[in-house]
Amino acid sequence: MPMTLSIRNQLPGTVTAIQPGEAMATVRIRLDGGQDLTAAITLEAVRDLGLAEGSSVRALVKSTEVSLATAPIDRVSIRNQLPGTVTGIATGGAMATVKIAIDGGSVTSAITKDSATDLGLAQGASVVALIKSTEVALATA
């Protein structure tokens, strides 16, 4: 029986490389839309999930961990930058939920209403979803 999760961003892909360290590993994933994504997870998780090159996975990212920029950013520690187009914005008193179409799927970002206003976000706007590798969890597909 498939697990139901509250995490909105579930991006399917395939493991292309695993770089182990002492306690953590970086796992490179080619998303179904063709983008590369990096996840930093524990070595124990790599073993428990049985990950290897070619493994099918889902990258899981909470919407609160997806930051937005209006253009790609050079010289930043955030490994994952997914370009896309805003397809919808829902604003509340303090927060905004921004839906973004990316190649092969979509990503949702929860940011402050002030940030959405400062960035001039509107439907059709080009954005880049920024995701730290340490905020990407993996599940076997």
Image: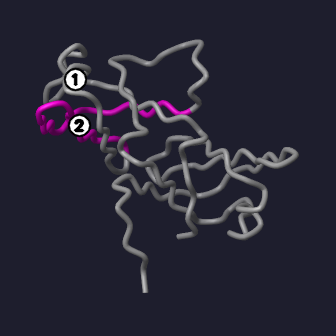
Which numbered marker is on residue 116? 1
Q: Residue at x 55, y 65 (%)?
A: 139
Which numbered marker is on residue 14? none
How dense is the environment of label 1, judged by Cα within 10 Å: few (below 14), some, or many (20 and up)? some
- Res 111 → quadrant: top left
Quick check: 75 above or below 68? above
* Secondary structure state at the residue bearing disc 2: strand
Picture coordinates of residue 22 (x, y %)?
A: 88, 46
Q: CA distance from mark 1 to mark 2?
A: 8 Å
Q: Say what amino acid the circle numbered 1 marks.
A: Ala
- Looking at this view, name the residue that lies furthest to the front: 93
Write down the region rendered in magenta: 80-103
Q: Is residue 87 magenta?
A: yes
Q: Going by the image, does 103 lie left or right of 75?
A: left
Picture coordinates of residue 85 (x, y %)?
A: 26, 32
Magenta stretch, main secondary structure, is strand
Quick check: 115 above or below 81? above
Q: Say what amino acid the circle numbered 2 marks.
A: Val
Q: Is residue 110 magenta?
A: no
Q: Residue at x 61, y 22 (%)?
A: 77
* Secondary structure state at the residue bearing disc 1: helix
Q: Which residue is mark 2?
A: 98
- Res 113 → quadrant: top left
> Disc 1 vs disc 2: Cβ atoms closer than 8 Å?
yes
